[in-house]
Amino acid sequence: MALFFIPKQIKPKKQLEKSIAVLPFRNKSIDQENAAFINGLMEKTLNNLQLINDFRVISRTSVEQYLDQIKSIPDIDRELGVNYIVEGSGQKYGNTFSLSVQLIKADKKEDHLWGRSFEQVIKEVDDILQIQSEIAEAIANELEANITAEEKQLIDKVPTQNLTALDFYQTGSEEYWKY
């Protein structure tokens, strides 16, 4: 009697929804006045990711609750229902800032998918915005998201060339989110 092996139909691998929560970046500066700058980096990163239609990005209002809380990635995943977490920390000293950002798969393994550290002297607004664009594009590449030409143009858009105006904007935005 011959036995025949009937192969199981192989289903295509289920692709995870590209849902992302960008957690508030931790301010590692001794000077707490730099919190607005670090939060500005987080907010622009979140906004850049929201411009990519392939992503579902959780609002800043929903992630702001994690600013002073220490929770595990699986707990945050359960609460927000996302598949990916972006977390970062940074500090500013004088005209230089340092920023570390990582992309983590939101599951029990907490796999680090991408991470990068930046150190940049701030001479002009582009020195800050270029890194923020680079972060969004690197995350999009890691998650194999499609970025249209229009989305890339919006991500790379420079809202101002004036460092003082950018600083005032970030400080004002920070005050808004506090209240």
Image (cartoon, helix red, strand yellow):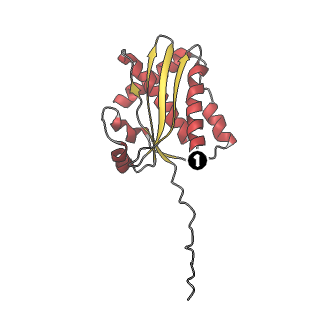
Choose top left, top right, bottom left or bottom right for residue 59. top left
Secondary element type, mark 1: loop
Given the image, on which type of amino acid does mark 1 rest? Answer: Asn
Choose top left, top right, bottom left or bottom right for residue 151. top right
From the top left corner, tell me how far across and down residue 171 is, in percent: 43, 21
Of residue 45 and residue 158, the one placed in the foreground of this image is: 45
Residue farthest to the right, as pictured? 149
Of residue 13 and residue 80, the one placed in the foreground of this image is: 13
Residue 97 as seen in the image, left or right of residue 51:
left
Name the residue at 39% across, 18% down.
29
Name the residue at 37% across, 36% down.
64
From the top left corner, tell me how far across and down residue 141 is, in percent: 60, 41
Report the quarter where the N terminus lies.
Answer: bottom right
Name the residue at 34% across, 29% down.
178
From the top left corner, tell me how far across and down residue 9 is, in percent: 57, 72
With respect to residue 119, does 157 lie above or below? below
With respect to residue 7, does 93 lie above or below? above
From the top left corner, tell me how far across and down residue 10 is, in percent: 57, 68
Residue position for label 1: 53
